[in-house]
Image: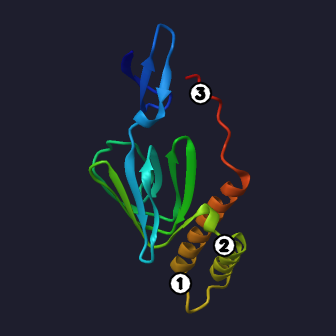
Amino acid sequence: MATRPKIGEHGEMEQITGAGLGQAQVDKEARPRLKFEVITAERVVYSDEVELVLAPGAEGQLGILPHHAALFSLLQPGEIMVRKGGEETSMAVTGGFLEVLGNKVTVLADACERSEEIDLERAQAARRRAEEYMLKKPADVTLAEAEAALRRALARLKVAERRRRGPPTRPPSTL
């Protein structure tokens, strides 16, 4: 039986095995992966081997695939998305640091919640409070603090809403 590497539709390497001419089977376990962890002061939010990490870097969205070059970045409030075996998991992060080193991605987050942990009513109330602070400008809250609170609330709402709608549908793979 012949074994040869093949580039998948999204650029990842897949192991193709064929018993004869015209027969091919994708070996999903052969896909390159990287270790990914999200850690807060309170707990480990996520720890697993994944195929892709998307994170909100200080200078824009970061896309990290296996064997990525070493990297260190600040994170801004937003969504972290990981893909493993075709399944996507989303998390809301309020900020922190991301390090890529030796096929391992570590996020040290100020706070982070998986999409299923987000209380939609609490997130909406936090957004309303932040908007009120920005309009009323109370003496004990600066505009920068109110804007940061609003960005955190909007990140949580975005992740929670995506979970309610479900993942986007993709066309079936031709492999």
The Cα–Cα distance between marks 2 and 1, rounded to whole angstroms, is 21 Å
Query: How many neighbours does mark 3 have within 10 angstroms: few (below 14), some (14-19), or many (20 or more)?
Result: few
Q: Which mark is residue 123?
A: 2
Q: Quadrant of residue 169?
A: top right
Amino acid at dot 1? Thr
Residue 114 percent across, percent down from the top left: 57, 63
The Cα–Cα distance between marks 3 and 1, rounded to whole angstroms, is 50 Å
| Residue nearest the viewer, comparing 109 with 15 | 15
The Cα–Cα distance between marks 3 and 2, rounded to whole angstroms, is 36 Å
Q: Quadrant for the C terminus, please.
A: top right
Disc 3 vs disc 1: which is toward the camera? 3
In the image, taking residue 146 as reference, residue 40 lies left or right, namely left
Q: Which mark is residue 142?
A: 1
Residue 158 percent across, percent down from the top left: 64, 60
Disc 2 vs disc 1: which is toward the camera? 2
Q: Which mark is residue 173?
A: 3
The residue at the point 52 percent across, 41 percent down is 85
Question: Which tag, 2 or 1, sits closer to the chain's start?
Answer: 2
Question: Which tag, 3 or 1, sits closer to the chain's start?
Answer: 1
